[in-house]
Image (spheres, rainbow, N blue to C red):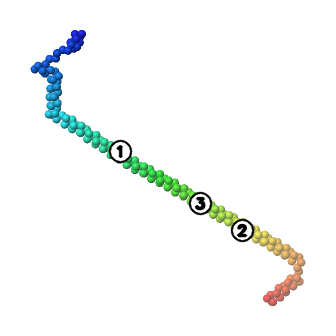
Amino acid sequence: MANFALILSEGVAEPASFGFINATVWVSIAMAIFIAILLWKKVPAMVAGMLDNKIAEISKQLNEAEQLRLDAESLKAEYEAKLAAAAKEADDMRARAASEAETLVAKAKADATALIGRRKQMAEDRIAAAEATALNEVRAATAKAATAAAAALIAEKHDANADKALVDQAIAGVAKG
């Protein structure tokens, strides 16, 4: 192994063909031929075509993604509008319900006040009727008692002569009238 390292370090002469063509020249010639074959077979055009196809596919995907983003934004805006409309409708319904509740409460208060007034009037009418009935009963009882007392007094103090005088006085009063 030491010999090999020695050979490399001493600068071994490279073999050459035709006296001037060494390995580096052969590699350069092979490389030029390879590049010429690639150009003759239009490999760069094929690579450019493949890259163009890939660019077109990526552009198409980007356009589709942009369209999807626009669709999503329009859907989002539509649903936000629907949400706002639903919130407004809910607020309107809440306001209508509150207004209707206030109207119903006011009507109920008015109806209750009217009912209380009617019941109070009915009670006052009943009390007045009971007072009138009681007054009539008292008057009737008083008249009955007065009549009975008068009848008893008349029966006790009146006789046939007093009756005759009263009858004559009543006839005289009728004849004048």
On the image, numbered disc 2 is attached to which residue?
A: 129
Image spot of residue 110 (x, y percent): 61, 62
Within 10 angstroms of label 3, few (less than 14), some, or many (20 or more) residues? Answer: few
Image position of 120 (left or right of 65): right
Q: Are marks 3 and 1 in contact (CB under 8 Å)?
A: no
On the image, numbered disc 3 is attached to which residue?
A: 106
Q: Nearer the viewer, residue 148 or 73?
A: 73
Q: In 3D space, how far apart are the residues under numbered discs 2 and 3 (Cα atoms)?
A: 34 Å
Residue type, mark 1 in image: Arg
On the image, numbered disc 1 is attached to which residue?
A: 69
- State which quadrant residue 10 falls in: top left
Image position of 68 (left or right of 119): left
Q: Secondary structure at mark 2?
A: helix
Name the quarter where the N terminus is drawn.
Answer: top left
Q: Nearer the viewer, residue 162 or 100?
A: 100
Q: Is residue 17 visible?
A: no
The disc, 1 or 2, on the residue closer to the chain's N-terminal end is: 1
Q: In 3D space, how far apart are the residues under numbered discs 1 and 2 (Cα atoms)?
A: 87 Å
Q: Compared with residue 175, is residue 153 higher up or lower down, i.e. above or below? A: above
- State which quadrant residue 170 falls in: bottom right
Residue type, mark 3 in image: Ala
Image position of 139 (left or right of 85): right
